[in-house]
Amino acid sequence: MEKFFRQDEVVKLSDDDLVAAYSGPKLRRSAILFGANLYSKGKHLIRFRIERKTNGNFYFGIVTHAQDDPESIFSTLTTAYGWWRCDYAVVHGVVRRNFSTIEILEGDEVTLSIDCDQTKIFLDHHRTQCSVQLLVDIDKCALPWKLVVALSSVGNCIRMLH
């Protein structure tokens, strides 16, 4: 069972590390959280609910297991693959806009699917029925992978659902 494990000190965890809130002070970047589990084979589903959205966006994705530095998650040195909302894909740390207007709102639920065998990740936004996928280059983001979530604004709060 996945839960939040490591995070920036501005993020407070609660409810057995299933709830993460960006409590401040504001950083010059988004607050980063990592998952506790490592994923190297099979398919894994992680469902989230946006408990509070004050401003900004949420990021859902993966990095290689060895990437531990929150400062480098969205730099050119990163192994990050994932999405800001459903319309900004991040591929090896580079943001690519999909030109969708889908917003993730307070109360929304999303599921991140990690498919190690097919080296793909998927994000399903349940309210809008938007589904996006990325093929992960394992030469740039080696297995095993771990979950990474980013909260871009103070006050934002997310819950992992089991």
Image (cartoon, rainbow, N blue to C red):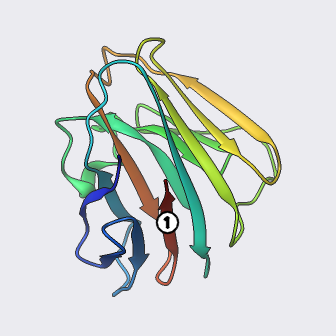
Q: Residue at x 22, y 35 (%)?
A: 65
Image quarter of residue 39:
top left
Q: Position of residue 21 (x, y in %)?
A: 42, 77
The correct choice, above or below, for 100 with respect to 30 in the image is: above
Q: Position of residue 67 (x, y in %)?
A: 21, 41
The reply to whether residue 58 is in sight is yes
Residue matched to label 1: 159
The reply to whether residue 56 is in sight is no
Residue in front for this viewpoint, 76 or 68:
68
Q: Position of residue 138 (x, y in %)?
A: 34, 16
Image quarter of residue 5:
bottom left
Q: In this rendering, would 87 be left or right of 78? A: right
The correct choice, above or below, for 80 with respect to 154 in the image is: above
Element carrying mark 1: strand
Q: Residue at x 31, y 69 (%)?
A: 16
Q: In this rendering, would 128 be left or right of 149? A: right
Residue in front for this viewpoint, 146 or 74:
146
Q: Residue at x 25, y 26 (%)?
A: 144
Q: Position of residue 100 (x, y in %)?
A: 80, 45
The correct choice, above or below, for 61 with respect to 160 in the image is: above
Amino acid under label 1?
Arg
Q: Residues within 10 Å of mark 1 (few under 14, many from 20)?
A: many
Q: Residue at x 72, y 68 (%)?
A: 105
